[in-house]
Image (cartoon, rainbow, N blue to C red):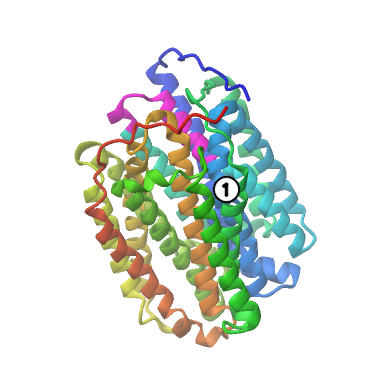
């Protein structure tokens, strides 16, 4: 196989760099929004399609599981065939799948369309980050740009429930997917006009066995949590799922450790900073998605709030994420990732602890305070996680680094939805507050993990090795 030899592009002007960043941020807004916008619409989708809470979990996780499983391969494809090219293909797939979601006549069709959406989104997230890194070579400017990127991504994740609630109230649940079409068209036009093509100097070969095993490991592990309440945690089916998860995970590690160009190079995890960034990414998104799903079900089912009211209640979360994400980016540029990651852990821990005693009539002010603290923690977290992962690898591996951390985020999102759903899937509305308490304790535990990881967040010596040359 012939690997394209890229030529170094001329430096971009400051205005062009800002434009490229804006276009990439627009795509990331779509990816983040569709990760959480459906949460607040789950009850409305359930009523519209005649399904219960258990089936609805797949509406969210079909997207996040496919996204998590394909991000790394999409990054490798972009390195080889051109980042702008793969980025544009991802936009088209995402837009077409969004239209299919809006027209879905049944839950099965909706879940399948959401999976295709995940394929398109996998071509946007790490590729957008690699485009930003390629266009902005100065480390300090790049750190600030990553702060902006993280701010937009954090805003989209936190604003999803608010946007979804407004659209459901005004136009019905299908409008949550129609809204993507004009944004995709705008992003395609802007990409064609302003985003330069770029590739890695040496593109990694595709690792199909690793890709298949990674997708299976992610899907089976999260699927076990989703199906556990239905089949019974100690049933033969559940035991078989546990064994399958362990077997596939072992096979993935075994295969990857012996490949010359693995999907995930095990040597990357010898760097404590990179490993801590991946673990932190999982923890942050478990916490965020547990909080969002429990909030949606508690407010709409236990307290009988409308989708708009339930979405509006998360505004403090969106505010905290929006304000603190760029601040975190500036802190990373000046002092490194340790301080903002520690702040993220502290705020997430406090936000979760506040609601570990949740009742049916808990004060709304206490709810809003918890959401604000969680949003602040989320805002502080993304920039140090992304910057630490990117700094641990050579710039030519930016898409791979972005792919691994983005996969960790989406795996955390899927895991959070599955864990929260397992806690409350079979719970009556008047018992939901009590049943959700372990979920809020889990949010606090994720924050505590960030505090423990913060000491390892300072990047060590950058890994400069490249993958071994392919066998002749």
Residue at 35% of width from left, 82% of height from top?
357
Please tell me whether residue 128 belongs to the stretch shown in magenta: yes
- Quadrant where the C terminus sits is top right
Q: Position of residue 18 (x, y in %)?
A: 42, 26
Q: Position of residue 73 (x, y in %)?
A: 57, 41
Q: Nearer the viewer, residue 246 or 6?
A: 246
Q: Which residue is mark 1?
A: 210
What stretch of residues is rendered in magenta? 124-142
Q: Is residue 438 left or right of residue 87?
A: left
- Quadrant where the N terminus sits is top right
Task: Classify 62 as above or below 229.
Answer: above
Residue at 50% of width from left, 35% of height from top?
128
- Residue placed furthest toward the left: 335
SS at mark 1 in the image: helix
Quarter of the view holding residue 344: bottom left
Residue at 46% of width from left, 46% of height from top?
404
Q: Nearer the viewer, residue 10 or 374?
A: 10
Crowd around label 1: few <14 · some 14–19 · many ≥20 (10 Å): many
Q: Main SS type for the magenta part?
A: helix
Q: Position of residue 337 (x, y in %)?
A: 26, 45
- Residue placed furthest toward the right: 105
- Residue placed furthest toward the front: 472
Residue at 49% of width from left, 54% of height from top?
253
Please tell me whether residue 280 belongs to the stretch shown in magenta: no
Number of numbered discs on residues: 1
Q: Position of residue 364 (x, y in %)?
A: 39, 74
Q: Looking at the image, can residue 101 be seen?
A: yes
Q: Nearer the viewer, residue 165 or 276?
A: 276
Q: Nearer the viewer, residue 87 or 37?
A: 87
Q: Looking at the image, can residue 319 be seen?
A: no
């Amino acid at each position: 196989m012939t690997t394209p030899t890229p030529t170094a592009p001329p430096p971009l002007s400051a205005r062009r760099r800002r434009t490229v960043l804006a276009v990439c941020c627009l795509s990331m807004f779509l990816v983040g929004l569709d990760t959480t916008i459906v949460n607040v619409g789950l009850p409305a989708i359930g009523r519209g399609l005649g399904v219960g809470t258990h089936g609805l979990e797949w509406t969210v996780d079909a997207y996040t599981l496919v996204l998590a499983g394909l991000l790394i391969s999409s990054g490798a494809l972009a390195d080889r065939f051109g980042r702008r090219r793969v980025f544009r293909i991802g936009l088209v797939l995402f837009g077409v799948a969004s239209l299919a979601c809006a027209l879905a006549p049944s839950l099965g069709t909706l879940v399948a369309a959401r999976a295709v959406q995940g394929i398109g989104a996998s071509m946007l997230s790490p590729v957008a980050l690699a485009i930003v890194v390629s266009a902005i070579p100065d480390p300090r400017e790049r750190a600030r740009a990553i702060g902006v990127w993280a701010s937009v991504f954090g805003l989209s994740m936190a604003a999803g429930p608010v946007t979804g609630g407004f659209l459901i109230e005004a136009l019905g649940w299908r409008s949550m997917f129609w809204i993507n079409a004009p944004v995709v068209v705008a992003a395609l036009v802007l990409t064609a006009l302003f985003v330069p093509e770029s590739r890695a100097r040496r593109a990694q070969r595709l690792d199909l066995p690793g890709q298949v095993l990674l997708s299976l490991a992610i899907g089976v592990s999260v699927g076990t949590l989703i199906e556990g309440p239905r089949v019974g945690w100690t049933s033969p089916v559940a035991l078989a799922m546990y064994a399958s998860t362990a077997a596939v995970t072992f096979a993935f590690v075994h295969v990857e450790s012996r490949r010359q160009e693995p999907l995930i190079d095990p040597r990357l995890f010898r760097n404590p900073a990179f490993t801590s960034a991946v673990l932190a990414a999982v923890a942050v998104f478990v916490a965020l998605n547990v909080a969002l799903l429990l909030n949606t079900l508690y407010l709409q089912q236990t307290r009988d709030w409308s989708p708009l009211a339930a979405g509006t209640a998360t505004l403090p979360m969106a505010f905290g994420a929006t304000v603190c994400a760029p601040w975190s980016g500036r802190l990373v540029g000046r002092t490194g990732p340790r301080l903002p990651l520690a702040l993220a852990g502290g705020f997430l821990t406090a936000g979760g602890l506040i609601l570990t005693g949740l009742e049916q009539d808990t004060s709304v002010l206490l709810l809003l305070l918890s959401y604000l603290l969680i949003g602040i923690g989320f805002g502080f977290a993304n920039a140090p996680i992304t910057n630490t992962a990117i700094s641990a690898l050579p710039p030519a591996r930016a898409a791979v680094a972005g792919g691994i951390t983005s996969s960790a985020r989406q795996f955390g999102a899927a895991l959070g939805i599955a864990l929260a759903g397992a806690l409350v899937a079979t719970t009556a509305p008047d018992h939901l507050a009590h049943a959700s308490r372990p979920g809020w304790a889990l949010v606090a535990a994720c924050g505590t993990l960030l505090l423990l990881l913060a000491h390892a967040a300072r990047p060590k010596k950058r890994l400069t090795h490249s993958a071994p040359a392919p066998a002749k």
